[in-house]
Amino acid sequence: METIKVFVERTEDGKTLNLPMYQTKHSAGMDMYACIHNETTINPGEIKLIPTGIKIAIPDGYEAQIRPRSGLALKHGISMVNTPGTIDADYRGEIKVIMINHSSEPFTFSHGERIAQIIFNPIVQGVWLETNQLEESARGEGGFGHTGK
């Protein structure tokens, strides 16, 4: 398994938390924690920005993706609005997660609660090659469920 070195800086409040960590040997993502002073409740349909208490410097050629935790989604209807969220290699601010409550019940986050996962991926940048007509394919312009159920 390939690894990369990622510099991490904790905010003052983040110093009370563990750094994100893999929960099992073969985990793809590290769990991230809520870094909040007081419990924070997200009401049904509400969106809130939850800080994590860390800033990172990702090596050039990589990104970090912030993804929802499946347990929060299944048990409580809690997810992210922009999933996955992308952290670019040149971003140096605190990572904050845009959470949403899809359930019919309020949900309360506590300081140190696992809220999301961070996954590192290599990046390939595209270069546009403009043309007057694209090469044909078997699928063509079919989309949005064109193959049925």
Image: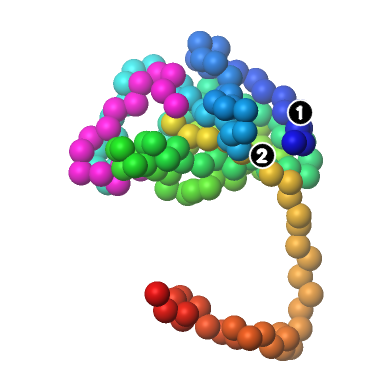
Specify the quadrant of the image occupied by residue 91. top right
Q: Quadrant of residue 124?
A: bottom right
Magenta stretch: residue 113 in it?
yes
The kind of secondary structure element at disc 2 is strand
Residue at figure coordinates x 76%, y 70% from the top left = 128
Q: Is residue 31 magenta?
A: no
x and y, in percent, of residue 102 in the image: 30, 46
**Residue drawn 52% across the image and 29% down it:** 31
**Left or right: 109 in relation to 56:** left
Residue 92 rendering spot, x and y as whole percentages: 66, 32
- Identify residue type, mark 1: Lys
Q: Hey, which residue is sitting farthest top in the picture?
A: 16
From the top left corner, tell me how far across and down residue 110 is, in percent: 35, 21
Q: Residue lying farthest front?
A: 25
Q: Quadrant of the C terminus?
A: bottom left
Q: Nearer the viewer, residue 33 or 26?
A: 26
Tell me which label, 1 or 2, sits earlier in the chain.
1
Q: Image check: 124 left or right of 25? A: right
User: In percent of the image, x 46 and y 75: which residue is there?
Assistant: 144
Q: Start and end of the magenta stretch? A: 98-114
Disc number for residue 29: none
Task: Kindly identify which residue carries mark 2.
Answer: 120
Helix, strand or loop at label 1? It is loop
Q: Which residue is mark 1?
A: 5
Q: Residue at x 42, y 79 (%)?
A: 148
Residue 93: % across, % down: 61, 31
